[in-house]
Each structure stands twice: as C-alpha cells, then as structure tokens.
Image (cartoon, rainbow, N blue to C red):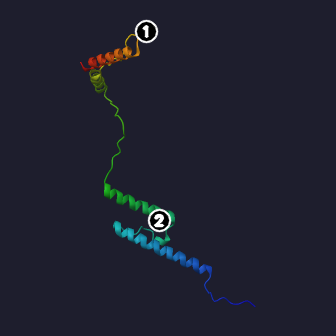
Amino acid sequence: MTRKSNYTKGLGKLFQSAKKQHQDKLRAQAEKLAGQLGVGLPSGGSVLEQTSLDDLIATVELKKEAWADDTGEAEYVAPGPALIQDARSRIAAERAATERRVLLSIPRRPRWREGMDVDELQALESEAFAEWRRGLAQ
C-alpha cells in the first residue's frame, strides 16, 4: 500500500498561481506607466486581456506620444550639397567658382648631370623648392 502524500496542491495550482502573480505585476506596471504619462489604460478592457503583441503596441504608442510631447515636431534634413534648380543660379555659381579658382604649378626638380655630388643636388633642390614657394607667395 502506498502512502498518501501530505501535499494537496498539484502542479496545475502552481502554474495558475505563477500566472496570476505575473498578471498582477503587469497590471501594476501598466497602471504606473499610465499614471506617469497622464493617460488612462488602453481601451479594450484590462491589461490582463491583452496579448503580448497588443501590450507591446500599446507601450510603443505611449512612448511615441511621450517622445513627441518632449521633443516637439522634427524635420528631416538630407546631408550633403543641395541641388540648384534655377539655370541662372547655376551659371552664377559656376562663375563665382571660376573666379575663386587659382592655378597651382607643380615644383620641378632642377637639372642634374652625371658627375654631380649628392650634396650639390640637394642644395639645388632646396633652392628650387624655395623659389617655387616664393612664387606662390606672390
């Protein structure tokens, strides 16, 4: 003969109790959030009757409203240069760019000969580079 267990609660009762605790926790969070945002609970009954997807959607909508209240209206501005639509404006912009354009010469190495010493070539290169820089300054 087997002994009768003193535990009268089964696993079903444990699952029901855990579910009820979770639902109570969700209700308290929803009421706290609704109180902070100054809105009532979402329409359609209590929080307990909502699915997890409905709960997520309701939370996102509340956060969007709170964000919009905090930040106000936003305007999207594309980065980068703007396209000039008017042909006359484009021509004027091209002319202005042409006036600002400066031609820059490339520094050239001095002529050398086969029997030239390294120090002598270095001195000629330094002198040619200094002359090129003086030309830029003018």
70 and 42: which one is in front?
A: 70
Q: Residue at x 35, y 66 (%)?
A: 37
- N-term-proximal mark, 1 vs 2: 2
132 and 116: which one is in front?
A: 116
Element type at mark 2: helix
Residue 54 is situated, as x and y percent measured from the top left of the image, at 48, 64
75 left or right of 115 in image: left
Residue 115, numbered label: 1
Q: Residues within 10 Å of mark 1 (few under 14, many from 20)?
A: few
Element type at mark 1: loop
Residue 75 is situated, as x and y percent measured from the top left of the image, at 33, 46
Residue 99 is situated, as x and y percent measured from the top left of the image, at 26, 21
The correct choice, above or below, for 65 with respect to 47 in the image is above
35 left or right of 11 in image: left
Which residue, given by chain and number where applicable, does mark 2 sit on? 55
Q: Residue at x 63, y 89 (%)?
A: 6
Q: Residue at x 31, y 58 (%)?
A: 70
Do the CB atoms of the residues marked 1 and 2 lie less than 8 Å apart?
Answer: no
Give me the C-alpha separation between circle 1 and circle 2. Answer: 89 Å
